[in-house]
Amino acid sequence: MTTVNYNKIWQGVLGEIEVQISRANFQTWFKNTQIITLTEETVTIGVPNVFSKEWLEKKYSDCIAKSLKHLGVNARRLNYEVISMRGQAPKAGPAAPTQVRPVANHAMPQQALTNRAEPGQGMLNARYQFETFVVGPFNELAHAAARAVAERPGQKYNPLFIYGGVGLGKTHLLQSIGNYVLKSRPTAKVSYCTSEQFTTQLVRAIKNQDVENFKQRFRAVDVLMIDDIQFIAGKEKTQEELFHTFNNLYEAGKQIVFSADKPPKSIPALEARLRSRFEGGMPVDISFPDFETRLAILQRKLEDRGAILPEPVINLIANRISYNIRELEGALNKVLSSCELSGPVTDLSKIENLIGDFSSPQEQTTTFKAVLEHVARHFDILPEDILKKTRKKEVVVPRQIIMYLLRTELNYSFPAIGRRLGGKDHTTVMYAVTKIENALEKNEQLRGELATIKERLYNY
Ligand code: ADP
Ligand code: MG
């Protein structure tokens, strides 16, 4: 039989299968397949990589055999062989997901740059580079501003203030600025720390009567980056010291970069003069990644590891985790390690189970008090006001979120929730919980807010 005939038969088989399975599955598993040889005993099918080979063998052999039969081919055995995309020559195919190789060099330079950051400060991690940062509509402004600052520190956008929810790339951008500056200006002094580290050092300096040294150290840098600045809320001495450090550096034309989980105007208990400094430069936000960018991020991380996963698996991960890139990475790592341990995952429901953990932390516990306080703090209102009988607009939504969290995180009954929240009727509680559930489906902003609240609930 000639190749042309093989081709005709295979097109017939594909035609039949195409109408039986989803388009995504068809594209993923049957693209670039063909019949290589056909005898009375065996049909050998060429496939583009090891992964397709295993998947087709396990999942689609029956279906293929049936279709072949309909076309008059009664082979007893189906054989799959990896072939190159362009020609017929067999080849190993791209790495299967079981073979995870080390991150490519450009993504993780061998030598960390931490040694050239200022002593006693937070660490710069060489993993965070602009090259490894995927840009999409949700973060392009923050990325562009960070790059501009890294290329010409102190000249544009000063201070740069990057804000957005947890796990969305703020630390990655700050550290990329630091790493870039250290690379391009070997003599520059770069300082990166979290606001908690800033506070801790200040407290230690006060205790050791060494505040002068603390001041000198921070005021001698060319680029000062303070991560998660929202945690200086309510810390008066830290705010005062930061204010003076800021003015000093600013006047000397040095670059200052901050990150926070919300815009300056929404950070509670922040001195007005500091708030106006934060607002005086360039505040840019990072919102939530759209589906396409989530896919691009997953693909990029796979590429860096030299691993591949079938499209439906990548789609599933991108679909399920939409508001936190750290979790997106975590889910991907989990799937990849599972592949390393027990071979390619052929069952999408198993993947669902694996990554399900990310949306519902199981072993963590919280309390009524913690839920109340964290939600109140998030919305910058007093816990007492939530418990009061009031319909004030600013407490209605936080109260509904608390009801929702008590139900989902603590398994409270509706009447119990009503009692705890100042004697509300259980139907009011049911209404509130359903309302939040529905809103969460549509409203990405709210999903992010809840993610932030939960992260704090369990991690602080
Ligand atoms: P945040 O500081 O906003 O909480 P991080 O900067 O720590 O978030 O990011 C969380 C994780 O997600 C990090 O591992 C980071 O490298 C990764 N990440 C975030 N944004 C991106 C992006 N745009 N492209 C690639 N990786 C990203
Ligand atoms: Mg961070």
Image: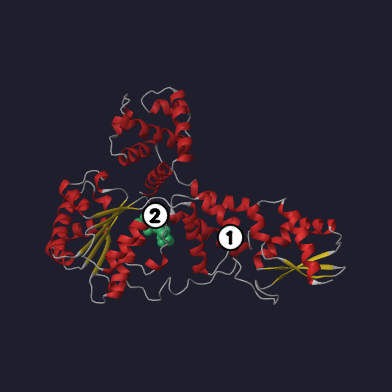
* Residue 300, disc: none
For the point 29% across and 64% down, which residue is it? 148
Type of amino acid at the residue the image marks with label 1: Ser
Type of amino acid at the residue the image marks with label 2: Leu
Does 394 sit above or below residue 25? above
Q: Quadrant of ligand 1?
A: bottom left
Of mark 2 and mark 1, the one earlier in the sequence is 2
Identify which residue, 360 or 286, lies in the foreground. Answer: 286
Q: Assign a secondary structure to mark 2.
A: loop
Identify which residue, 448 or 136, lies in the foreground. Answer: 136
Identify which residue, 86 or 97, lies in the foreground. Answer: 86
As drawn, is 278 to the left or to the right of 167? left
Q: Examine the image and state in which quarter residue 317 appears.
A: bottom right
Label 2 lies in ligand 1 vicinity (Cβ under 8 Å): yes
The residue labelled by disc 1 is: 338
Residue 93, how many percent across, how many down? 63, 72
Identify which residue, 172 or 208, lies in the foreground. Answer: 172
Quarter of the image for the N terminus: give it: bottom right
As drawn, is 291 to the left or to the right of 214? right
The residue labelled by disc 2 is: 168
